[in-house]
Image (tube, rainbow, N blue to C red):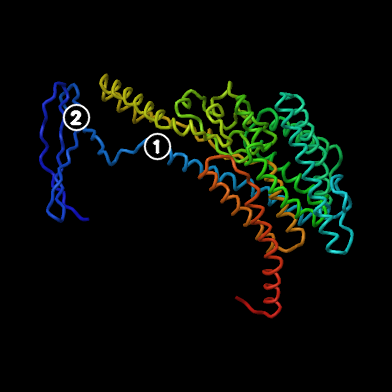
Amino acid sequence: MNSSILNSSPGHSISNTSEPTIVNTNVIVNEDGTTRVLQRPSRRSTTAGGESNRSTEVPLPSQVRTPIEEEEEFELKYGAKHVIKLFAPVSLCMLVVVATISSVTYYTRKDGYLLYTPFHEDSPDTGTKVWNAVANSLILICVIIVMTIFLIILYKKKFYKVIHGWLILSSLMLLFLFSYLYLKEVLEAYNVPLDYITVAIVMWNFGVVGMISIHWQGPLILQQAYLIFISALMALVFIKYLPEWTTWFVLAVISIWDLVAVLTPRGPLRILVETAQERNEQIFPALIYSSTVMYGVVGTMTASDDEIPKKPKRKRNAPTRPMAQGEGGQNDRDSSDVGGFTSEWREGIDTRAEARTRSNQEQSRTTSSTNPTSARRVEELHPAPQQTDEEERGVKLGLGDFIFYSVLVGKASSYGDWNTTLACFVAILIGLCLTLLLLAIFKKALPALPISIAFGLTFYFATRSIVTPFTDLLANEQVFI
């Protein structure tokens, strides 16, 4: 509705202070003839010479945003930013696997199998292959369940040295043994000569720097690069040593297990995260990829507003291991839920926001009453820092999700069909996007495998069975769409 605005001359109001208060009166005339009178008081400060500075208008009630709206906008802004940050490493891990499968034939040759897959699918009968794949996948998932429960028992009993030794041993094998095999096969594939002394020096530096970055401290981007690389190595190992049909059944079964482990009240991964939060301890950095600091599974981490100013700002070259509660803040202390958003935390948003607003108003009034001109100049020169540092929030993804995403795309690329490979790649990113959307809605930890793997398997079989034959037929008939 259009309206005309008439500005009346400002009238001075009586005030017992030395600074006069000016009331700007706006008369709004609507089309139906009705009028509205709006008064916006503004304070004019005078200098020692009698000259008045420009007035600062008090915002209208409709222009004032509630603390809850500001907090929701803040979470949406930084949540979307870190979601984008998560797409890049997932895509990079899958691209490394696809590039290796396409250029190095070592990972597509079946010259051995894992101990957990006793059935090798050698029979030409389809029924035999199916039950062999089902049996292999069930055996493998049982091994995963047993190892996960064993890890939970060790953590419950506080056998931290055993857990760290286990993870360090695994990292040593990946960074030295499997990395050496990978480098050897890549050099052979591209026919690049290299002496053993140089290889030994390169592998020693690569492995030592990786161990320090993952298990101690180092630049965040360096730690992320090592985690992506070891995830790609594990995916290549699974692609090489898992039988063909078993790979697809394992992907389906592991997605179902991910649902159970994260969402059920007694799920192992849920118990692990809840126990870590109860003890105010960190999740092991060798298990989690984070766009900022470490946490667990797939979740967001938000520090409570009244504690954020007490936390030191984390530099980019700061230690990349997760901050323990005594070292960096109270992130996990206020979040007893798996995703870091409890009912108590959500109910306390208003209280914390009101307290912060009152504190800011009192500080502003004190500064303005003491020296209004200096206060305004200081505010212009040194704007107030943001309540929450950008690097304090982020999305976390388990390395297992990286591995099985890459297994699906790498297995699809091993057949040489780029239509299927691209379809699986896009399907996984769509599934991850939907998972993160659900994460923003429910604000609790969610399994990252089910949606992405379901989309990937659907796109794989649909593309290979329908789209690829259709495009081949069009190409043979020279029909262009």
In the picture as drawn, the residue positioned furthest to the top comes out as: 370
Q: Which residue is mark 1?
A: 68
Dot 1 falls on a residue whose secondary structure is helix
Q: Which residue is mark 2?
A: 44
On screen, residue 289 versus residue 371, left or right, reads right
Crowding at mark 1 (Cα within 10 Å: few <14, some 14-19, many 20+): few
Dot 2 falls on a residue whose secondary structure is loop
Res 19 → quadrant: top left
Q: Nearer the viewer, residue 128 or 172?
A: 128
On screen, residue 422 versus residue 346, left or right, reads right
Q: Can the viewer see residue 190?
A: no
On screen, residue 324 versus residue 370, left or right, reads right
Q: Nearer the viewer, residue 179 or 461?
A: 461
Which quarter shows the N terminus? bottom left
On screen, residue 104 versus residue 289, left or right, reads right
In the picture as drawn, the residue positioned furthest to the bottom comes out as: 477
Front label number (1 vs 2): 1
Residue 132, given in percent of the width and then of the height, sits at 84, 55
Q: Nearer the viewer, residue 293 or 273?
A: 273
Marked residue nearer the N-terminal end (1 or 2):
2
Crowding at mark 2 (Cα within 10 Å: few <14, some 14-19, many 20+): some
Q: Residue at x 52, y 33 (%)?
A: 342
Which amino acid, mark 1? Ile
Residue 93, given in percent of the width and then of the height, sits at 68, 47
Residue 58, given in percent of the width and then of the height, sits at 24, 34
Q: Are marks 1 and 2 in contact (CB under 8 Å)?
A: no
Q: Residue at x 71, y 68 (%)?
A: 465
Q: Nearer the viewer, residue 415 or 187?
A: 415
- Vertical placement of residue 365 versus 394, above or below: above
Which amino acid, mark 2? Arg
